[in-house]
Image: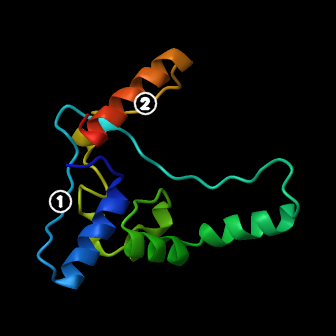
């Protein structure tokens, strides 16, 4: 078992199938819910070339570009204009685009006080290392 983001796990699943190496990878959202995931594009306030930054963001907002990204990396996108260009198998895959019921069980992670974050980090390291 591993904790991972849907796109990363689904890419690993695709690579394993392509390799025909007998490795079976699956992904699911726990029935109890999980932290919601999303990517964003931002530009630092002190970016050296603001014009280029906006040009890149505008490029990413093109429907076909965003659909191509989704089709390749299996990450959902919020560009409604790209919906018809996304592979129907991906668009209907609840591992990529969770159902309304699943979405209702997702939550945003909150910043934790440092002492709680340290406990979480120590606990997670124990789980990862088995110690």
The answer to which image quadrant residue 123 occupies is top left
Q: CA distance from mark 2 to mark 1?
A: 25 Å
Q: Residue at x 49, y 26 (%)?
A: 110
* Circle number at residue 121: 2
Residue 35's spot in the image, x, y percent? 36, 37
Look at 25% across and 56% down and name the residue there.
95
Location of the C terminus (image quadrant): top left
Asked whether residue 127 is in view, the answer is yes
Residue 13: x and y in percent read 24, 69
Instruction: Indicate whether 103 appears above or below 23.
Output: above
Give residue 17's position: percent from left, percent from top. 19, 78
Of helix, strand and loop, which one carries label 1? loop
Query: Which of the 4 quarters of the picture holds residue 29?
Result: top left
Tag in front: 2 or 1: 2
Give the left or right position of residue 22, taking residue 73 as reference. left
Specify which label sits upstream in the sequence, 2 or 1.
1
Q: In the drawing, what numbered circle is on residue 26?
A: 1
Number of numbered discs: 2
Label 2 crowd bin: few (<14), some (14–19), many (20+), radius 10 Å:
few
Give SS at disc 2.
Answer: helix
Q: Residue at x 33, y 69 (%)?
A: 11
- Residue drawn at x 68%, y 52% as measured from the top left: 42
- Residue 114 vs 10, above or below: the answer is above
Q: Is residue 85 above or below residue 75?
A: below
Tell me if 66 is positioned left or right of 128 in this view: right
**Badge 1, how many Cα within 10 Å: few under 14, some, many 20+?**
few
């Amino acid at each position: 078992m591993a904790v991972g983001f849907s796109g990363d796990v689904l890419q690993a699943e695709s690579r394993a199938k392509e390799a025909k190496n007998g490795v079976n990878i699956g992904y699911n959202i726990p029935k109890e819910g999980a932290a919601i995931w999303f990517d964003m594009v931002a530009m630092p306030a002190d970016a050296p070339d603001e014009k280029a930054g906006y040009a890149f963001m505008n490029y990413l907002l093109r429907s076909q570009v965003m659909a191509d990204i989704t089709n390749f990396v299996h990450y959902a996108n919020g560009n409604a204009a790209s919906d018809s260009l996304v592979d129907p198998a991906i668009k209907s895959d609840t591992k990529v685009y969770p159902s309304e019921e699943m979405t209702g069980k997702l939550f945003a992670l909150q910043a934790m006080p440092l002492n709680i974050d340290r406990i979480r980090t120590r606990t997670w390291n124990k789980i990862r290392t088995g110690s």
